[in-house]
Amino acid sequence: MEMIYRQFEPLPLGSLIFTKADETSDIHAMYRMVRESGLPVAWLTDGQEVPDDLVNGDPSRLTDRLLEKEGWTQWTKQDV
């Protein structure tokens, strides 16, 4: 992911798009890319049916995904 970003970095990038986000084993890589690039996430794809599986990359969606991947969703549902 970082190698691909570096190839496009000279261009005037305005946001990031993450594809196959549902297949990643390292959700943290997405967060590192956002932090290091300073760019917002415009879109994610969560499946093979594009554009049907294309979802807005809003911060709450990314946070929910991280919490779910780490098994922390039980805490958020208990208002902890």
Image (cartoon, rainbow, N blue to C red):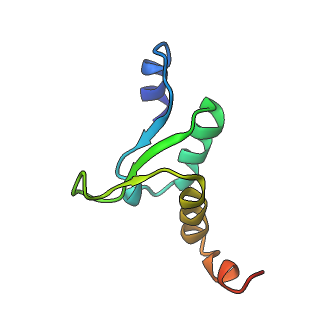
Which residue, as the protein is rendered here, is positioned at the far left? 49
Residue depicted at 50% across the width and 19% down the height: 9
Residue 47, percent from left and from top = 29, 59
Residue depicted at 53% across the width and 55% down the height: 27
Up-down: is 1 above or below 4?
Answer: below
Q: How many numbered discs, if any?
A: 0
Which residue, as the protein is rendered here, is positioned at the far bottom? 78
| Quarter in which the N terminus is drawn | top left
Residue 43, percent from left and from top = 42, 46
Residue 58, percent from left and from top = 54, 52
Residue depicted at 58% across the width and 51% down the height: 28
Up-down: is 18 above or below 59?
Answer: above
Which residue, as the protein is rendered here, is positioned at the far right? 80
Quarter of the figure with residue 21: bottom left
Residue depicted at 44% across the width and 52% down the height: 56
Residue 32, percent from left and from top = 61, 42
Up-down: is 43 above or below 52?
Answer: above
Up-down: is 44 above or below 77?
Answer: above
| Quarter in which the C terminus is drawn | bottom right
